[in-house]
Image (tube, rainbow, N blue to C red):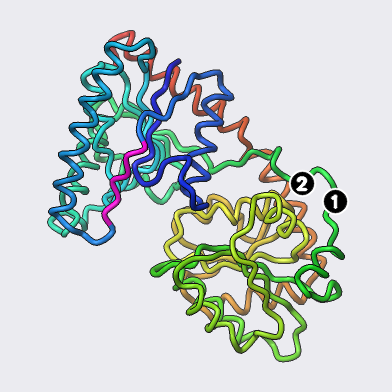
Amino acid sequence: MKIAFHAPLKPPDWPTPSGDRRMARLLMAALRGAGHDVVVASRFRTRDGAGDTNRQERLAALGDRMAERLLRRFETGGWRPEIWFTYHLYYKAPDLIGPRVARELNIPYVVAEASHAPKRAGSPWDPGHCAVAAALEQADLVIGLNNHDRACVEPVLGPGGRYVQIRPFLDLNELPRESVDRDRIAKSLGLSKAHPWLLAVGMMRKGDKASSYAILADALTRLPKGDDWQLIVVGDGSERAAIEALFEPFSDRTVFTGALATKALFDIYAAADLLVWPAINEAYGMALLEAQASGLPVVAGDTGGVPDIVRHGRTGLLTSSGDAPAFATAVASLLADSDRRLAMAEEARAVTATEHSLQSAAHAIDEALVSIVSGRGDGRA
């Protein structure tokens, strides 16, 4: 089928790496892997982080004009979509194009990863909140990637809408095919290969990411004295200086790498001993999934869709969100038990390969798409 793809938060070719951009690309790869013809319909970004109602009104007007332009192109051009597919729908970045295009072309409207926050009604983001609610009411299919979203999204769907839950996924072909040279990485980063390596991966920006770094720094102060751990921090952003300052007490054992290309990051996943990320308000955390695919056990905060990825006691440990003492206890327990870390590493590889592969996601998504298209053809949707 011909599928028009749109990611209103940030397009798949957005220059700054992020989990959102990565999942957008993976969804397109899954759709293409199932044999569909996928075209990025628009790179229009609708994000309003400040709650500026005037800006939201301007974005809505611009979105309407862009929808008209797309409709003219689809009606007169040689390529006309059979499905509209929007990735990541929430009140700060509503879809202001897809619902109208899908309605006027009489094609299914599909959303992957949507959230609906009733508390935003009447807030400065009320226009975006209402736009999300209207889009969900129209949606033929919502593909959930974060099980935490389901309770608020499903009741908003219209009578023909369907909700299908899948697990976040990866292209496992991106994993290093050869064993990683820990000696080389130790030398390049100035680390001792004899001591355990903790790894944190996250963008350095205000809000939840900065809060996660603050909880991590607090937790590290609580680890037993004399432990010989070292910390690698991968990430960059506007708050880097402030975040580096949080880890000043451990400067002799901490390395900041900045942002890394995919291959370099996966090499570090494979060489490290434990991923540590408090995951404050994390949707699910692509880094957590990438780490486990690389055989790296995880300690993370139990929030959002993180439990959909980290199997507590099997592939890592989950602690109460924001609880630095509990986080420190979990990290210390795994630092002290290398056999348990190795067992979790093997389980993490196995679980990711069987439950989080691109191929399994492509099959599940394709099955859902075929179902809604056939249902429309039979007059059931």
Q: Main secondary structure of the magenta part?
A: loop
* Residue 207 image position (x, y, % from top left): 39, 69
The structure residue drawn at horizontal position 24% and vertical position 37%, both measured from the top left corner, is 96
Report the Cα–Cα distance between label 1 and label 2. 7 Å
Camera sees residue 325:
no
Q: Amino acid at mark 2?
A: Pro
Query: Vertically, is 318 above or below 220?
Result: above
Report the disc number at residue 176. Answer: 2
Report the disc number at residue 179. Answer: 1
User: Could you tell me which quadrant the C terminus lies in?
Assistant: top left
Q: Nearer the viewer, residue 157 or 67?
A: 67
Q: Nearer the viewer, residue 294 or 158?
A: 294
Q: Secondary structure at mark 2?
A: loop
Query: Vertically, is 381 above or below 94?
Result: above
* Residue 74 image position (x, y, % from top left): 30, 16
Q: Are marks 1 and 2 in contact (CB under 8 Å)?
A: yes
Q: Amino acid at mark 1?
A: Ser
Left or right? Give the position of 125 relative to 208: left
Q: Nearer the viewer, residue 168 or 92?
A: 92
Query: Vertically, is 234 above or below 36?
Result: below
Q: Nearer the viewer, residue 140 or 54?
A: 54
Camera sees residue 204:
yes
Query: Quadrant of the rendered structure where residue 351 is?
Result: top right
Left or right? Give the position of 258 relative to 46: right
* Residue 26 image position (x, y, % from top left): 54, 37
Q: Which residues are magenta?
A: 43-48
Does residue 45 show up magenta in the picture? Answer: yes
Q: Secondary structure at mark 1?
A: loop
Query: Quadrant of the rendered structure where residue 134 is?
Result: top left
